[in-house]
Image (tube, grey):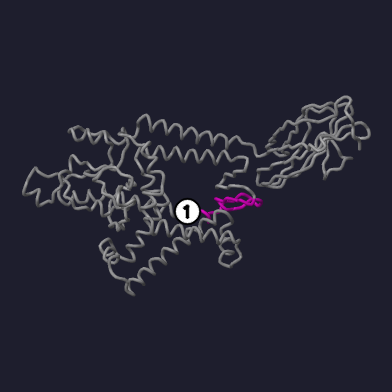
Amino acid sequence: MPEKLYEKRQAVHNKRIDGPFRRFKWAMMIVTLAIYYVTPWIRWDRGPYAPDQAVLVDLANRRFYMFGIEIWPHEFYFVAGLLIMAGIGLFLVTSAVGRAWCGYACPQTVWTDLFQHVDRFVDGDRNARMRLDAAPWTWGKVLRRAFKWTIYAVIGFATGGAWILYFADAPTLFRDFFAGDAAPVAYITVAVLTLTTVVLGGFMREQVCIYMCPWPRIQSAMLDEKSLIVTYKDWRGEPRGSVKKARKHPGEFGDCIDCNLCVAVCPTGIDIREGPQIGCITCALCIDACDRVMAEVGRPRGLIDYATLEDCEREARGETPRSPWRTLLRPRTIAYSLIWGSIGLALLFALGVRSHTGLTVSPDRNPPFMLMSDGSIRNSFTLKLRNMESRPRDMAIALEGLPGGVMWSDTIGRDDAAPAQVMTVPADQTRTMRAYVMAPAGTGERDFAFRITSQDEQRETDSVETRFSAPEAGQPRDSQ
């Protein structure tokens, strides 16, 4: 039995580094944070009857608005399609360039990177932070920690505050929140998200990626010897030796001078020279560090590089590796791309041809019919008329397949009964009406349909079949 069931955490104090991958990581952090914090404040004109927030999850009215797109509850397949596209996109990115999502765009990575920059701003770079951690608790250290954790709390509060703005009108909720007039769920949500942001991004950090996130375990099924991943070329770097040793013993040492800078800059604290491992998020900061060292000692770059296992073996044999485009354009990534694109095109097609008019019909079952004093038969139905336009529209409801049938409602008297009626449906709403359908005496049980037609230039229609209930021969008849 092992003496320990878990390994004690070693604090990670990553060193600042500059290079193309670090600059790309900066750009991704700025873009993703800007999208998250700014999006609720973007306005989008949908007319006088719809909210003007560009992206809004309107739980009260069960709507999802995203710029010019409005998703209703019965159209949840659009959301499901987007989630499927996100999953396939993650498979595509992983099979092509490894855990690039984890390294650059994952929320845990983005906020952890932000908190690490706060550490550098308050405590200094790597060596200064290590000395401060090892130092005894003094008033100076307490004040410095309090200042840093206050910044953590502000970032966490801004994160939770931005999240709730996606579920209500942002300016209104912002004012109500600080005035104390917002709903209790808003304060609870902000408190929970503030706490989780600070704990996960400020304190747990790489432990979330290594122990809590399931994706590192799943990615092994997505990667193969043709996937581009951050790789240490051990055939070139081993055995390791300092520059002085290499000069004294030419030809006995590899290119790696064992400076450990690749370990010092890693945000999860791993040593990439030990091979692919679960802690590697493919951020490629070790490439920036190693390339800088190689330039300083006059050796070729690429000791740590984005490469496939196949190309590493080919390069070790002295052959020329393939170009990145040939590496990316292979059957597996092409198949993922085609599936991803097909789903996207299908969603766009469905969005383009969808009707903005809908009808739902529910017949009453207790009683299924009423026999009137003149022998005619009446059924009752609950109709839901759906207007998905951001303006009121008149809807004509007509009976089809029921000879001699007429209808009226709670707002249209029986004296005005007719085979078709016109109802006004408010903008972006569903109007519920109770419809009474009456057929002449002698009408038997049969199928018929309600057809709804918008009375505007679009003339959109929807039809729902239902069943007209009538007494069978010899059946007792209730009359009214």
385 shown above or below 190: above
Instruction: Tell me the element at label 1.
Output: helix
- The residue under the point 18% across, 39% down is 235
Q: Is residue 195 left or right of residue 14?
A: right
383 shown above or below 170: above
Q: Which quadrant would residue 398 be assigned to in this image?
A: top right
User: Label 1: which residue?
Assistant: 36
- The residue under the point 68% across, 36% down is 460
Total residue callouts: 1
- Magenta stretch containing residue 56, yes or no? yes
Residue furthest out toward the bottom: 139
Q: Is residue 473 left or right of residue 347?
A: right
Q: Could you say where residue 476 lies in the image, as x and y percent from the top left?
A: 89, 30
Residue furthest out toward the front: 1
Magenta stretch: helix, strand or loop mostly: loop
Q: Name the quadrant of the C terminus.
A: top right
Front-most of residues 254 and 298? 254
Q: Is residue 228 left or right of residue 196?
A: left
Q: Could you say where residue 14 lies in the image, as x and y percent from the top left?
A: 29, 56
- Magenta stretch containing residue 255, yes or no? no
Front-most of residues 191 and 346? 191
- The residue under the point 81% across, 28% down is 402
Q: Could you say where residue 223 lies in the image, as x and y percent from the top left?
A: 35, 36
Q: Could you say where residue 76 lies in the image, as x and y percent from the top left?
A: 58, 41
Three-letter amino acid code at the position of disc 1:
Tyr
Q: Is residue 327 left or right of residue 390?
A: left
Pointer 1: residues within 10 angstroms few (<14), some, or many (20+)? Answer: some
Magenta stretch in the rendered image: 37-60
